[in-house]
Every structure is written in structure tokens, then in C-alpha cells.
């Protein structure tokens, strides 16, 4: 039997009737841009993450990009990013013409190391973007403290963290702006691309709402050079249905993670480390192994699908060859790329599938 890495189809069938009736009513409404489905999703998501404002956008990359635009960040500016992240965090910075300045993660948590941020700040630093990688909140208190000391705003990349909490409060408005992706594979995923920002700052919510819609508040009146980056009502209707199931689905992820952490006892495997005060959304469950590729091959032979998040850190991607960060510049990120392995996890994963993963690892 094959254990899929993430079975999106099984999750779909679990709530098929609800989704299909929501999609049909959205199609029949005659509203295909904006309108009540989009507005209601924004309200419901803001309330779920306990933020004052939610502005939906086209995808997660656009959410980070528009957050940077709303803060007037552009050419000549520097933005602090983790050295280990999905490339979108860096791309959003490059897209506004600013320079991504990588900071290494904490070896245990895999999230940006707050103690290394201060040394990376210069007079050109205009924002810090912690990423809540694999669903675990970055250590926000010391990050916000260092940001405040330097008067620099914080944009959280929460693409993987729907439902995560930090010191009891949901990820959603700790920093100045929080960027979300609803890519299908995320904990809350659409049937296509979708994204949003949440914030407690009305001024920033307003700027992003204008930027996403051609820089226009009133039709055919353009205040700024904006973009077309809107959430479709059909996707909003799907997200509204799935949001109602998110808590339960995250609990299932947490249960699987709990079993892995308790029952994987192989001494060569390093389990994920969750910092005090953080509640992970368990988007991914990433172990470490010194001979990762071999382990991955043998798990595949035993029917266990795994993935690597991520095999090449952004600074070693050809896309960033122009920055001339040689191999060895960010050794922690590089070691993570060589040793991390993501095990199957998801709301539709059955107990016997979890058993199979644990048994396959025990045989190592
Ligand atoms: C998925 C993801 C993004 C980008 O989201 P898209 O909706 O695919 O554009 C950004 N950052 C992180 C950490 C992600 O995992």
C-alpha cells in the first residue's frame, strides 16, 4: 500500500457536498469579481486569526509583494529574510527592487534565529520577514523587540501557518502585516491560487486593498500604480467552507505529529523541535537524517511518499547567482537542505497509514 504525501482528493471527498453547493451558488450569483463571498471570507478569516483586517489577494507571493509595496519598500532598500525558506519570500523582495538579506535559522526550530538579526540590520534595512516554516511560528517576541529597537516593520510570511499560535494568540497580527497563501496544499487551501494579508493597521489594509485593484478605490480613478491581484469569488466560496473545517483538520495533523514524535525512536533520526510558547499548525513534519537521500529511497521502496522542503536554499539557486553568495555562506541552511525529509501528514491521513510510516522508519 502506498502512503501518499498529502491526499487532497480524499479531503475533497470528505466535504464534497458542501463545497459543490457553495461553488454552484457562487457561479449562479453572477458576481465573478469581488462581492459578498469575497467580503465574507475576509471577515471570517480575520476573525479566525484574530486580526482587525483581512485583504484577500491572488496568491501568497502577491501577499508578500503587496505588503512590501504598502510599506513603500523599493530599490536601495534591504529586507531581512531567512536563509532557509521557500523562494517566494525572497522573490517578493526582489520584485520590489529591494535586496533580500539572508539570516540563518536556529538549528533546532528551523526558523529565523532572532539572535542573528541585529548584526544583519543596516541603515538601509526597511523590513524583517520571519517565515513560520513548516507551520511553527517563528520566535516572534525577540524578533518584534529587535525590529522595534530599530524602527523596522515586520512582515510575517504565514503561508504555512493557518491556525498556528504564538503564546496563545493566533498568528495573524503579531507583526505589522501577515501574508497568507491558500495554495491547494496549504493547511487552508483553495482549488487553485489564492492569498491574503491580515493586519491590525487600518492604514496598511487600506493601501493593500487599493494596490490589489489597479491602484483604484473608485472605478476608473487611479490613485497609485497598482496591480490586478484579487481573490476570485468561487475560490472565496471554497475557502469559506474549508475554513469551517480547519480547526478539526489541524487537530488531525497535530495528532499525527504527536504519534510520529512519540513512536519514531530511531537514534539516527532528529525529530522536529517546537519552541516554548509555539503551537505549530503542522503543515509539514520534517525529520533530519545524515543520509537523507538513502532513507528517502528506502521509504519509497516501502510505499512511503516523502518530499524535501527544500532541496536547494535560495542563495544557491541560479535565480540568485547574481548575488554571488557562494556555497558555505549560509552553512545552517545548506545543512538543512541536505538532511531534511518531510514525512506524510495531512487531515485525510488514516491511522494505518501512520502505522506504516512508523514501521518503515523502525526498520531503518
Ligand atoms: C506557499 C508559500 C508561499 C507562496 O505562496 P503562493 O500562494 O504559492 O504564491 C510563500 N512563502 C511560503 C513560506 C510558502 O510556503
Image (cartoon, grey):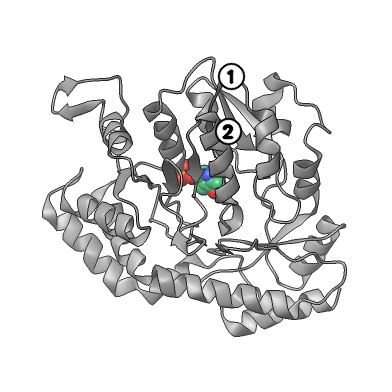
Identify the residue at horizontal 71%, vertical 23% (top origin).
Answer: 321
Cα gap from disc 1 to disc 2, whole angstroms: 20 Å
Q: Could you tell me which secondary element the residue under label 2 belongs to?
A: helix
Ligand 1 within 8 angstroms of badge 1 C-beta: no
Q: Which of marks 1 and 2 is nearer the N terminus?
A: 2
Identify the residue at horizontal 87%, vertical 57% (top origin).
Answer: 290
Q: Nearer the viewer, mark 1 or mark 2?
A: 1
Q: Mark 1 points at which residue?
A: 123
Q: Which mark is residue 42?
A: none
Ligand 1 within 8 angstroms of badge 2 C-beta: no
Category of crowding for the residue at label 2, using alpha-carbon neighbours closer than 10 angstroms: few (below 14), some (14–19), many (at least 20): many
Category of crowding for the residue at label 1, using alpha-carbon neighbours closer than 10 angstroms: few (below 14), some (14–19), many (at least 20): few
Q: In this view, does 62 lie to the left or right of 364?
A: left
> In the rendering, at what x and y percent does residue 312 appear?
72, 41
Identify the residue at horizontal 45%, vertical 43% (top origin).
Answer: 60
Residue 128 in view of the camera: no
> In the rendering, at what x and y percent does residue 188 appear?
42, 60
Q: Which residue lies furthest to the top in this view?
A: 76
> Mark 2 and mark 1 in contact (Cβ < 8 Å)?
no
Camera-side residue of 181 and 2: 181
Q: In this view, does 244 lie to the left or right of 334?
A: left
Q: Mark 2 points at which residue?
A: 90
Identify the residue at horizontal 60%, vertical 84% (top origin).
Answer: 351
> In the rendering, at what x and y percent does residue 196 appear?
37, 46
> In the rendering, at what x and y percent does residue 357 appear?
71, 75
Q: How many marks?
A: 2
| Image quarter of the N terminus | bottom right
Q: Is residue 40 left or right of residue 11?
A: left
Camera-side residue of 283 and 200: 200
Amino acid at each position: 500500500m502506498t502512503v501518499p504525501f498529502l491526499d487532497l482528493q480524499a479531503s475533497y471527498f470528505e466535504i464534497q457536498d458542501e463545497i459543490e453547493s457553495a461553488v454552484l451558488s457562487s457561479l449562479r450569483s453572477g458576481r465573478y469579481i469581488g462581492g459578498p463571498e469575497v467580503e465574507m471570507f475576509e471577515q471570517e478569516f480575520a476573525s479566525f486569526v484574530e486580526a482587525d483586517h483581512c485583504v484577500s489577494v491572488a496568491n501568497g507571493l502577491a501577499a508578500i509583494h503587496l505588503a512590501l509595496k504598502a510599506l513603500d519598500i523599493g530599490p536601495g532598500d534591504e529586507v531581512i529574510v531567512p536563509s532557509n525558506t521557500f523562494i517566494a519570500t525572497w522573490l517578493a523582495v526582489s520584485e520590489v527592487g529591494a535586496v533580500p538579506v539572508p539570516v540563518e535559522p536556529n538549528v533546532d526550530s528551523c526558523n529565523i534565529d532572532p539572535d542573528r538579526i541585529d548584526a544583519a540590520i543596516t541603515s538601509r534595512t526597511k523590513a524583517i520577514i520571519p517565515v513560520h516554516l513548516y507551520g511553527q511560528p517563528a520566535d516572534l517576541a525577540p524578533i518584534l523587540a529587535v525590529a522595534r529597537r530599530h524602527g523596522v516593520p515586520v512582515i510575517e510570511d504565514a503561508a504555512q501557518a493557518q491556525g498556528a499560535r504564538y503564546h496563545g494568540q493566533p498568528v495573524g497580527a503579531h507583526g505589522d502585516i501577515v501574508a497568507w497563501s491558500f495554495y491547494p496544499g496549504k493547511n487552508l487551501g483553495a482549488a487553485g491560487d489564492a492569498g491574503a494579508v491580515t493586519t491590525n493597521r487600518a492604514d496598511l489594509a487600506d493601501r493593500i486593498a487599493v494596490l490589489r485593484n489597479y491602484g483604484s478605490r473608485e472605478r476608473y480613478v487611479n490613485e497609485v500604480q497598482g496591480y490586478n491581484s484579487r481573490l476570485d469569488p468561487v475560490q472565496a466560496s471554497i475557502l469559506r467552507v474549508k475554513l469551517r473545517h480547519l480547526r478539526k483538520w489541524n487537530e488531525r495533523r497535530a495528532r499525527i505529529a504527536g504519534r510520529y514524535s512519540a513512536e519514531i525512536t530511531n537514534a539516527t533520526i532528529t525529530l522536529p523541535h517546537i519552541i516554548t510558547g509555539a503551537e505549530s499548525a503542522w503543515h509539514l513534519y520534517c525529520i533530519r537524517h545524515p543520509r537523507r537521500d538513502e532513507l528517502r529511497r528506502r521509504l519509497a521502496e516501502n510505499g512511503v511518499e516523502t518530499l524535501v522542503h527544500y532541496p536547494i536554499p535560495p542563495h544557491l539557486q541560479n535565480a540568485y547567482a547574481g548575488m554571488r553568495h557562494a556555497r558555505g555562506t549560509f552553512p545552517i541552511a545548506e545543512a538543512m537542505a541536505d538532511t531534511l525529509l518531510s514525512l506524510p501528514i495531512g487531515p485525510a491521513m488514516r491511522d494505518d497509514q501512520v502505522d506504516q510510516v512508523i514501521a518503515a522508519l523502525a526498520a531503518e
